[in-house]
Image (spheres, rainbow, N blue to C red):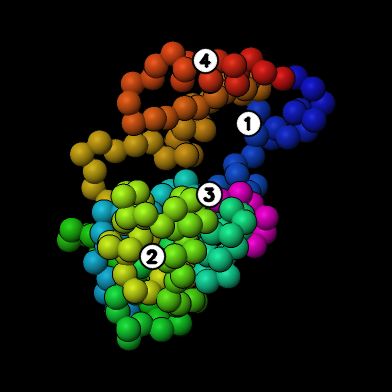
Amino acid sequence: MNEIEKIKRGSDGLIAPYGGELKELIIRDENQKKQLLSEIDFHHECSERNACDVELLMIGAFSPLEGFMNEDEYYSVIKNNRNKNGLLFGLPIVLDSDNPEVKEGDKVLLLFKGQSLAVLEINSKWEPDKLSEAKFCYGTNSLEHPAVKMIFHERGRFYLGGRIFGLELPKRDFPCKTPKEVRSELPPNYDVVAFQCRNPIHRAHYELFTNSLSSE
């Protein structure tokens, strides 16, 4: 381990979370929850994709984000793959809606299959440039690409950005550990390579992460 690597590690022997701080957004104070729920202007039923994004925000998997990206961040990410602070984000993290009445300053209760997941405090609302989003993010505007098809046929007319106040996580048949839980199990002062794909790993995957682990 070189001196630069040593400096990057904290007192727990782990490197800092992306962006410098793990942002867990679930509200623990019951009085604060009641106050937020008393200020709701609109309700929004989340899609599966919305609910996943809300969950990832709440547990800190999208750290250092504290909510959905605003319009400036959205355009920065789709054109430069970085947010306004220069941090790498391959795709924008946004909430879509077809509700023309919601506006900046409103508080929206995010619902999913009978659960109240979170409160979104809107600080940005806009009609996205979906042509540019598809082209810059996926390299094509062809509807044969499943993500491009999702942008045009599944996402709503408006995007909403703003801070998230988490209430509860979606109930999952196969719950996953949070970033904080994973970090608590990592060995201190060791390099760890994490890898995920939709299929069982094959030889090319194996060579990829073993070479990454052994590289200086």
| First to last magenta residue range | 84-90
Relative to 92, 176 lies left or right? left
For the residue pair 116 and 153, the one nearer the viewer reads as 153
Is the Cβ of the residue at disc 4 closer than 8 Å to that at disc 3? no
Cα separation between marks 2 and 4: 37 Å
x and y percentages locating residue 168 in the rendered image: 31, 55
Residue positioned 76% across, 28% down in the render: 6
Residue positioned 42% across, 66% down in the render: 130
Which numbered disc, 2 or 3, marks the residue closer to the eye? 3
Q: Which mark is residue 148?
A: none
Q: Tell me the residue that label 1 is attached to.
A: 14
Q: Earlier in the sequence, mark 1 or mark 2?
A: 1
* Element at label 3: loop
Residue positioned 41% across, 49% down in the render: 56
Which residue extends farthest left?
114
Looking at the picture, does residue 64 appear above or below residue 116? above
Cα separation between marks 4 and 3: 24 Å
Q: Tell me the residue that label 3 is attached to.
A: 90
Rendered image quadrant of residue 8 = top right
Residue positioned 52% across, 15% down in the render: 207
Hey, what amino acid is under mark 2? Leu
* Element at label 2: strand
Q: Tell me the residue that label 4 is attached to.
A: 207
Give the class, few, some or many, for how many residues have Cα within 10 Å of label 1's Cα (few <14, many ≥20).
some
In the rendered image, residue 87 lying in the magenta stretch gets the answer yes
* Element at label 1: loop
Hey, what amino acid is under mark 4? Glu
Cα separation between marks 3 and 1: 24 Å
Hey, what amino acid is under mark 3? Gly
**Quarter of the image containing the N terminus?**
top right
